[in-house]
Amino acid sequence: MDPPVVIWEQEVRSLLHYRDLIPSLEVALGKFSSRDSAEVIQPVRSTIPLQKHSGFMGLMPTYMERDGILTTKFVCFYKRQEGSALPAVQASVVLLDPENGNLKAVMDGEVITATRTAAVSAISAKLLMRPGAEVLAILGTGKQAQSHYTVFTEMFSFKEVRVWSRMREGVERFIQSVGGPVKGCASVEEAVRGADVIVTVTGSTEPVLYSQWITPGAHVAAVGACRPDWRELDDVLMKDAIVYVDSREGAMTESGDIILSGAEVFAELGDVINGSKAAHRERTTVFKSLGMGVEDAVSAQLVFDQWKDKK
Ligand SMILES: NC(=O)C1=CN([C@@H]2O[C@H](COP(=O)(O)OP(=O)(O)OC[C@H]3O[C@@H](n4cnc5c(N)ncnc54)[C@H](O)[C@@H]3O)[C@@H](O)[C@H]2O)C=CC1
Ligand SMILES: O=C([O-])C1=[NH+]CCC1
């Protein structure tokens, strides 16, 4: 058996491309929602608190029998003070051979996490935003904001992209770093008024996005607030919108926006992909993302396959 390889940040970045990842993720989301254990076995993330450090470690094992993919991601995520130089999310992915259980690769999981999360949000927008969407608003200016800017501007032709952060410097840094057109906004309201698609990628634990500012028919990809007592969206928005999730079980266990608002989950993205639930593009829609192991699994397999081809 070959010894395991280590594939780290820059190399993962050079091997993982949205053009390959998005179709693989669409197939994987559909397989997950079919609840066929020969396709995907993926329990809800098991999470332990790192109380002393205001953080959590999540363990995300996944087995895709038909695809021969066995992985686990270890992800640590923290409630950071705004402006902290420490990363909010750190992750590693291990890829194993399901036949023997031997380790094939250890990979940097930060690039995988940033890339696959943005790709899944883009899939939600592709399925749920109204036709002719022109304005994208991004709330937050960290790692996820960057990856979401990249994939949303690659996949769609927005006429205007707006960004907001509570910290002015965050907005300025973001504008400098993305190398494309983007308008900095001084308030959430300014960023989201009239926006067709809104991405929330903040470290907030309280609502930042309120229904009263949103144009009916907008699509919201809500990516932060991944704990049962954390929020990004207000109750009215959660109750009025048609709510889609990545995993129903995950949402009922981990999403404060769903649990605390009492909002009803209409469907998983995979149900829409499989054609078993409708895409209500004409209504205000929320995609509540929590992140799934199956997304990391297909990403890691793509990275490993590309790495082998280049060897
Ligand atoms: N759904 C998913 O699959 C994933 C979700 N996440 C979550 O996405 C969020 C963003 O992650 P990263 O971009 O990696 O973090 P980051 O630390 O790089 O960026 C966080 C952004 O939120 C802002 N922020 C922090 N506290 C805030 C507050 N109280 N109110 C408003 N803005 C605030 C910061 O200024 C920064 O712009 C986090 O909540 C993280 O846990 C991260 C990875 C995957
Ligand atoms: O899926 C994921 O990797 C995460 N979800 C919340 C924080 C990290």
Image: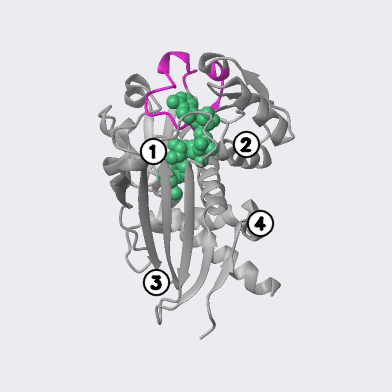
Please tell me which of labels 3 and 2 falls first in the chain: 3
Secondary structure at badge 4 equals helix
Magenta span includes 202: yes
Which of the numbered marks, if any, corresponds to residue 92?
none
Q: Which amino acid does label 1 sit on?
A: Tyr
* CA distance for labels 1 and 4: 33 Å
Q: In which quadrant of the rendered view does residue 237 lie?
A: top left
Mark 2 highlights which residue?
149
Give the residue type at disc 2: Tyr
Residue flagged by tag 4: what amino acid is it?
Answer: Gln
Asked whether residue 223 is in view, the answer is no
3 or 4: mark nearer the eye: 4
Q: Distance between the residues labelled 3 and 1?
A: 26 Å
The image's mark for residue 65 is 3
Mark 1 element type: strand
Q: Is residue 85 visible?
A: yes
Q: Which residue is drawn at 47% across and 45% down?
A: 89
> Dot 2, crowdedness within 10 Å: few (<14), some or many (≥20)?
many
* Of the image marks 3 and 1, the number of the one nearer the N terminus: 3
Q: Residue 244 carries which label?
A: 1
Label 3 amino acid? Glu
Q: Are marks 1 and 4 in contact (CB under 8 Å)?
A: no
Q: Residue at x 26, y 29 (%)?
A: 260
Q: For residue 280, which quarter of the picture? A: top left
Mark drawn on residue 10: 4
Q: Depth check: give the residue in front, 86 or 110.
A: 86
Under tag 2, what secondary structure?
helix
Q: In this view, does 210 lie to the left or right of 185?
A: left
Q: Which residue is drawn at 31% across and 33% down?
A: 256
